[in-house]
Image (cartoon, grey):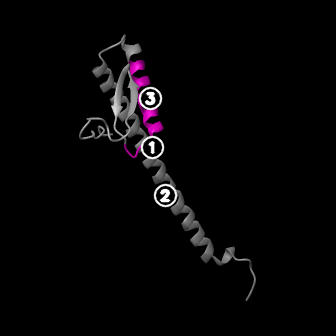
Amino acid sequence: MSPSPQHPESGESTEEALVVQIYDQSFRLGSSSADPEQIRQAAAYLDDKMRALAAKRGRGVALELAILAAMEVADEVLSTQQRREQLLADADERIDQFTQTLEATDHDPATSDGSVE
């Protein structure tokens, strides 16, 4: 998300901004094509990650917690992408196997109904 454009005369935002709370800090985000509810959920998710890390580590500097939380989230994203790629590869392989089976069945006289034309 980018910062909100400012109105030239008043300095106020020309677009409606979204304000989220992460680790007791407010962040004003400019509007974008992203779903505001999804942005709120992402902020809450990051806030939860930072608080969990703070609880494990006995609090901590917000920047350090944010970086560690970002690393955890990045690891989750990469793991999910790898899992998705593996699932797609498995699906492609199964589709190929089914296609080969269907093609073999279509051309195999032993699988026909036995009627003579």
Circle 1 SS class: helix
For marks 1 and 2 on the same chain, the one whose residue lies earlier in the sequence: 1
- What residue occupies the far left of the structure in this picture? 8
Q: Residues within 10 Å of mark 3 (few under 14, many from 20)?
A: some
Q: Residue at x 68, y 75 (%)?
A: 110
For marks 2 and 3 on the same chain, the one whose residue lies earlier in the sequence: 3
- For marks 1 and 3, give the CA distance: 21 Å
Q: Mark on residue 92?
A: 2
| 91 sits left or right of 68 in the view | right
Q: Amino acid at mark 2?
A: Asp
Q: Amino acid at mark 3?
A: Tyr
- Give the labeled residue for mark 1: 83
- Give the labeled residue for mark 3: 45
Asked where in the image residue 5 lies, by quadrant, the reply is: top left
The percent position of residue 35, horizontal first and vertical second, equals 45, 42
Q: Amino acid at mark 1?
A: Arg
Q: Is residue 40 magenta?
A: yes
State which region is magenta. Answer: 32-53
Q: Is residue 46 magenta?
A: yes
- What residue occupies the far front of the structure in this picture? 9
Q: Residue at x 32, y 14 (%)?
A: 60
- What residue occupies the far bottom of the structure in this picture? 117
Decide: marks 1, 2 in contact (CB < 8 A)? no
Q: Residue at x 44, y 29 (%)?
A: 45
The percent position of residue 7, horizontal first and vertical second, equals 27, 40
For marks 1 and 3 on the same chain, the one whose residue lies earlier in the sequence: 3
- For marks 1 and 2, give the CA distance: 14 Å
Q: Residues within 10 Å of mark 2 (few under 14, many from 20)?
A: few
Identify whether 27 is placed above or below 31. above
